[in-house]
Amino acid sequence: MVASIQSSSSSASCCIQTVNKSTGTNLFSTSSNLPFARFLSKKPLTVVAMAPQRKVNKYDGNWKKQWFGAGIFLEGSEQVDVDVFKKLEKRKVLSNVEKAGLLSKAEELGFTLSSIEKLGVFSKAEQFGLLSLLEKVAAVSPATLASLSLPVLVAAIVAVVVIPDDSTALVAVQAVLGGGLAVVGAGLFVVSILLDEPALLIRILRAIREKPRIALKLFRRIEAHPEFVRSEFAFSVMLEILMEGNLTRPAYWVIERGISVGMDGIVDALIGGDVKGDVLIKILDYMLWVYTKKVMLKECLLVIDKMLKSVLLPDVKNWNRVLKILRDKRLVGKATEIFEMMRAWGIKPTVVTYNTMFDCFCKNAEVDKALHLLSEMQKKGCVPNDYTYNELISLVSKKGNLEKAEDLIREMLESGLKVSEFTYNPLIYRYCKDERFGEALSLVSEMSARGASPTVSTYNTLMYGFCKRGRILDARSQFSNMLKKNVKPDIVSYNTLILGYCSLEDIREAVLSFEELMCLNISPTLVTFNTLINGLCRLGELEVAQQIKENMIHDGIRPDVITYTTLVNGSWKIGNLSKVRFFFNEMLNMGLKPDRYAYTTLIVGELRLAGMDKAISLREEMRANGFPPDLIIYNIFVHGLCELASLEEAEELLLKIIRDVIDPDPMAYTSIIHAYLQQGDLRKGQELFHEMISIGLTPSVVTYTVLIHAYACKKRLEMAHAYFLDMQEKHVQPNVVTYNALIHGCCIVKRIDRAFEILTEMEEKKVEPNKYTYTFLINVCDACNWQEAFRLYKQMLDREIKPDFVTHSVLMKQLNKDYKLHAVKYLQSLLQGHEGAAERLNDMNWSEENFQFVDFSQKAEQWLSQH
């Protein structure tokens, strides 16, 4: 049970309740309407005394019913806390002291922080660890600190009064104890004011500016307090003190702290204060450096703007740092604006400034601006360095201005600068890209002669250029040269070789190169495996490609979307629809998101192997996954309909492409034209050809080639020649397939001389013949001209063009037994030096009963249709 009594001096009503503690039930209740209420309300209660404790009735939880005991209620007391310091805080004693001007009077009498510091008080406090103690004390609230300071100061006075000065020892004790207490009390008092009054902190910091490290410690202790009222002026004064003492590392902390707590007005506080000019520039430059280091571009530009408005010029190094940030962010326009601002304010750019601007122009491929800047740089007397020239050479090389690049190299050498691989490699790369291998190799010799040894990057560039052109033997030769020069090949070197061999469908050599890199402990990359898988899929070796994929997973290399897209592509090419779907689903299960190319490859497979319905559903799935149908997808569907001989539907889809305002390209028209031509409807194909021209489309080389091929096969060579001339008039350059179609047409109508004239024309126009070109020409050489056929055969071997079974078949088909044996011997004599070809020739069984000739006309049709 709990009893509670409520009384009021202003009301005659009284309520008494007795409550069962366990049940919460009122046992009895009285109110003003009860008979005894009037006795309780006769006289109001009057307070006659107060005490720090008051009596209360407490419930005795250990009481139990007995014949004797203390009873249910015990009389107890409740302690009332009295905090003198808080009462002083509420009365605003400290604020009144400040308002009364006592601190100012103390300063007038010479009792200042500076005078205290001259006595070495702060230094001694630091020496005895009092400042460290102050750090702990600072965790207490400002009001509490102020309250604590008063009794400590009183104790100091008491110590002086109470302790007698009868002896020297007592005088010393009196001085030490009283002085110590006075210092502690004053310190507590000052700290309490500092936390609430940033202006006083600023005055103290300035008073001890000759001791910057002590000032910093005080600032850090005070600033770390959660109740400290921060001020940009306090930060600015602290920076001023530190930079005057050349304490840059602590200044860095102050700037960082200001950034973290959002002190955005420090620069304004510095510029608006009374900081000396040289110190001010020093601080602002240092702040600008910190901002550039943290890549705070907005703050950098703001500081520069405010400095210039106050006619304070930032250091050129900071200008350069800001320019580099703009360069890295590809803000070339803003970088140019800052560069012009530098010159307008008379700040002389350095070679670093110019090189940064060269980088900007290189990123935007602005050759003219870069060359103009070089001219201006030289006129201003700023000497370009090797980095300057290397950047310019790289830029003009990428743009294809190789003569200018070589001029810059000569200018560089005349200036006494040293060339390096960075000077030559961009130029070599461009020569290889333009298939000017002679000039590229000449540059390699030149760089070696001038002390710039070719690097692995140099050789990789040459190898890639040769592999791209199918000149794998030349690529392998450069690989050997690299080893002779003790240049260690890297994974890029082997990836390039593997790519070259796979492009020529020489998977055996590609695998040998792969094994070679593994023996050298060079770790294959995802690119290595993807290249091998692609080469195997091109040859239809899907099971081996799948095994390579499993091996790469075992080696810890995760397949990507390209890996699975290649496998899907290889699967539909061999007609395996189940594998097409298996690899695509496995890609999804691996958590990989198909890209547009992956979906496109799958759609092609479904069109070829399953029909239109599944392909259409995939198109909608593409759209749902964020890949709306584009022109490529529409072209694929047009081509698929053409292969299904649904030419009317293909034309309807073509009209839809035009209606949907998707700019059509020649591909869709070419697919439909090709389909009509294959059906023998030359007139319809010609009508569509003129229709595409009428809507503003320029026929592509493929469009012209299918027309030339169709008319040539129909022995209408004049029309084929007419299209051939028309494409050149429209600046559409024929490729090797175009020439092959025309040569094949000449061979059909037995115009052999014209066929050889076309071969010569190909070579003049730098169009490399391929194995189909030579096979067509060898096929028209009759039995009386078999030496010419063998000459062509040797020429194709000299050009590293690998003949196949069809080439060998047409080479021997018109020879009788007597000539055949003689021809083989003659051929072996021609093949000296072509070890691989000679071995293949010896492996062949040339007996009449084992040699099977192919239907060449049918094979030629297949070749031209595929290409």
Image: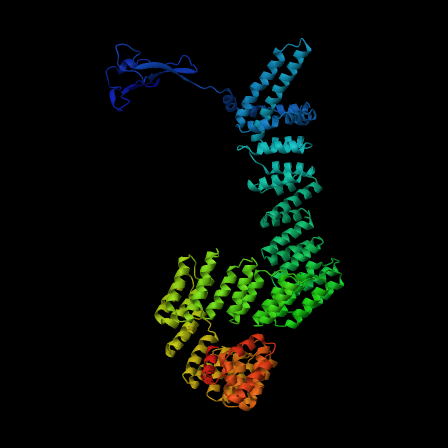
Residue 759 placement (x, y as % from top left)? 57, 83
In the image, is residue 647 above or below residue 450?
A: below
Residue 616 placement (x, y as % from top left)? 37, 68
Residue 636, quarter of picture: bottom left
Depth check: give the residue in front, 202 or 178: 178
Residue 357 visible in this rendered orientation of the protein = yes
Q: Quadrant of the N terminus?
A: top left
Identity of the residue drawn at 60% across and 69% down: 475
Identity of the residue drawn at 28% across and 22% down: 21
Residue 108, quarter of picture: top right
Q: How many marks?
A: 0
Depth check: give the residue in front, 486 or 203: 486
Depth check: give the residue in front, 173 or 18: 173
Residue 184, quarter of picture: top right
Residue 39 placement (x, y as % from top left)? 28, 13
Identity of the residue drawn at 66% across and 60% down: 358
Left or right, 448 with respect to 495, comes to: right
Residue 629 visible in this rendered orientation of the protein = no
In the image, is residue 791 above or below residue 130?
A: below
- Extreme top residue here? 166
Residue 215 placement (x, y as % from top left)? 64, 32
Depth check: give the residue in front, 847 or 552: 847
Scheme of colours in the image: rainbow
In the image, is residue 161 above or below residue 232?
A: above
